[in-house]
Amino acid sequence: MKRVTDPLDDKVKARIVGRDRTDPGYVSSGSEHSAHADDDVASPSLSDLFFAFDVDDGGDSSPESNDSDSEAGRLMCDSSFRNADLIKPILLDRTDEFRNVLLAQVLKAEEVFSCLKSDKQIMRRNVMAFLRGYGYNAAICKTKWESSGGLTAGNYEFIDVLEKDSSTRYFVDLDFASEFEIARPTNSYDRLLECLPRVFVGKSEDLKQILKAMSDAAKRSLKSRGLHLPPWRKHRFMQNKWLGSYRRTANLFPASFSSPSSTNMSYTVECRAVGFDTAVNGGRLLLPATTRTR
């Protein structure tokens, strides 16, 4: 090194060695950014540029796990915690006695009619009939809306129960969590999704908060993956599913379902009568045939 640098003067040596700028002998080569830019933005090294690329293998290599120290990752984690903080108190609240008993009856009905899980519509009608047999003002609610202002048309069906004394409306959804599944979810969104119950029973105030939190989380998760938010996962669409204009019916049979008197078809279904009073509704199922219980 001495053979190379000895013939050079101090200024040239400083350029080669890279003397600190605070050194009085430092001379700029004229290739740096302005002082203002250097103060605000640190120039990345070659290794920083190389390792900054995010390789998504569909596992834990999401921006929030590989780049958890970055501002974007921190904000996403903070948002996920805030959303979880909004949802968990709602689902863990046990102060509403009417809701607690109603949820227990819904789960009981699901167990009784477990043989009908493959047909959600039939299952929903039987659960509704079960609740009515126990004196609940239960019905099937059908929401339907047209496309307008960027909103995609759609329809949805669930059960609602009106409390007798206060006419408070309780929403009953037998497959609630699945309505919030998205493509390539981040780890944070997966954890938030796990907070949601498969069977939801709650009031409109609770439902509104959950919809807002989940829609916000879905938008952030998809954006971090470079994906667009699909129309059926937008907040307005999700609101219309449960909170839009609806038609309420207590009919045991869907409009498109043939009544037993108009068909010669027969079915045999075996269901478990776990804790189920067969006197309720005469042990009746919503199928146009003889039903055996065991």
Image: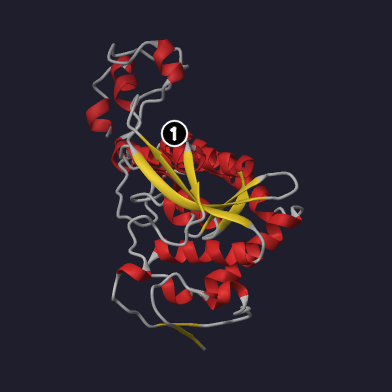
| Residue 109 versus residue 179 in the image, above or below | below
User: How busy is the neighbourhood of tag 1: few (under 14 within 10 Å), some, or many (20 plus)?
Assistant: some
| Residue extending farthest front | 261
Q: Is residue 160 left or right of residue 58?
A: right
Q: Quadrant of residue 36?
A: top left
Is residue 94 visible from the viewing direction of this image? no
Q: Residue at x 32, y 55 (%)?
A: 58
| Residue extending farthest bottom | 294
| Residue 197 versus residue 112 in the image, above or below | above
Q: Is residue 141 left or right of residue 234?
A: right
Q: Report the amino acid beneath label 1.
A: Arg
x and y, in percent, of residue 108 in the image = 60, 71
| Residue 120 versus residue 165 in the image, above or below | below
Q: Quadrant of the N terminus?
A: top left
Q: How is the image coloured?
A: secondary structure
> Looking at this view, is 117 or 221 the one in front?
117
x and y, in percent, of residue 280 in the image = 61, 73
Secondary element under disc 1, as helix, strand or loop, is helix
Q: Which residue is mark 1?
A: 236
x and y, in percent, of residue 258 in the image = 33, 64
Q: Residue at x 37, y 55 (%)?
A: 255
> Looking at this view, is 245 or 48 the one in front?
245
Is residue 84 visible from the viewing direction of this image? yes
x and y, in percent, of residue 7 in the image = 23, 21
Q: Is residue 172 left or right of residue 27?
A: right
